[in-house]
Amino acid sequence: GENVEQHPSTLSVQEGDSAVIKCTYSDSASNYFPWYKQELGKGPQLIIDIRSNVGEKKDQRIAVTLNKTAKHFSLHITETQPEDSAVYFCAARRGYQKVTFGTGTKLQVIP
Amino acid sequence: AAGVIQSPRHLIKEKRETATLKCYPIPRHDTVYWYQQGPGQDPQFLISFYEKMQSDKGSIPDRFSAQQFSDYHSELNMSSLELGDSALYFCASSPRNEKLFFGSGTQLSVL
């Protein structure tokens, strides 16, 4: 089955700086890569996603890049704000199958 | 916009008791997923349903069962509860092969 690794497990940045979270996946047939933000006591919230036929996608301060050859994908958050503090999960999915999550990154934005 | 609704929000049970968790997907979403998330862990896939039929199965104990009803809501039934079953249980819904949206979860505590 799919295995998704995520780094770093914790990340502290100053407000206004950028944050980068990296993931690798094992199943070369995975074709959908969502990113979720989870705040304490809440469910994962989809913030951005990318499909395997696209190399990069951007939505305001958030961008995701995908390298299919290396089986890497990354989340980039620019101009970080305190409200960006949360746990972020990358995930991968093959076709109609379940979404497999990475181990999570706890992001702390220091005002 | 309508979201995934889960009930109850919190549930406290004794060991060896049973519990039933309910999930109401977003209207017109035909696929439901159940995930279990332990403290500080990533969500682990339990089971999914597409058009009321089980579509995939993950690390779900034999003590657990689930089904999707004609109105597309789903229930996760958990019997002979153990201390280790204490976790957040999330339901997610999606149109087939599309984005997954998660509910706020049910916090199950087994005493």
Image (tube, rainbow, N blue to C red):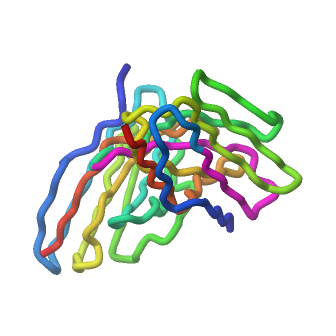
- Left or right, A14 with reference to B16: right
Q: Nearer the viewer, residue B16 or A111?
A: A111
Is B96 magenta? The answer is: no
Above or below: residue A98 compared with residue B2: below
Q: Which residues are magenta?
A: A20-40
Q: Nearer the viewer, residue B65 or B41?
A: B41
Residue A6: give x, y in percent of width and height. Answer: 61, 60
Q: Residue at x 61, y 24 (%)?
A: A59
Above or below: residue B81 compared with residue A6: below
Quadrant position of residue B19? bottom left
Is A39 magenta? The answer is: yes
Q: Residue at x 58, y 50 (%)?
A: A90
Q: Is residue B69 visible?
A: yes
Q: Nearer the viewer, residue B49 or B12?
A: B12
Residue A36: give x, y in percent of width and height. Answer: 50, 43
- The secondary structure making up most of the magenta span is strand
Q: Residue at x 17, y 72 (%)?
A: B110
Residue B101: give x, y in percent of width and height. Answer: 46, 37
Q: Residue at x 44, y 38 (%)?
A: A45
- Left or right, A97 with reference to B100: right
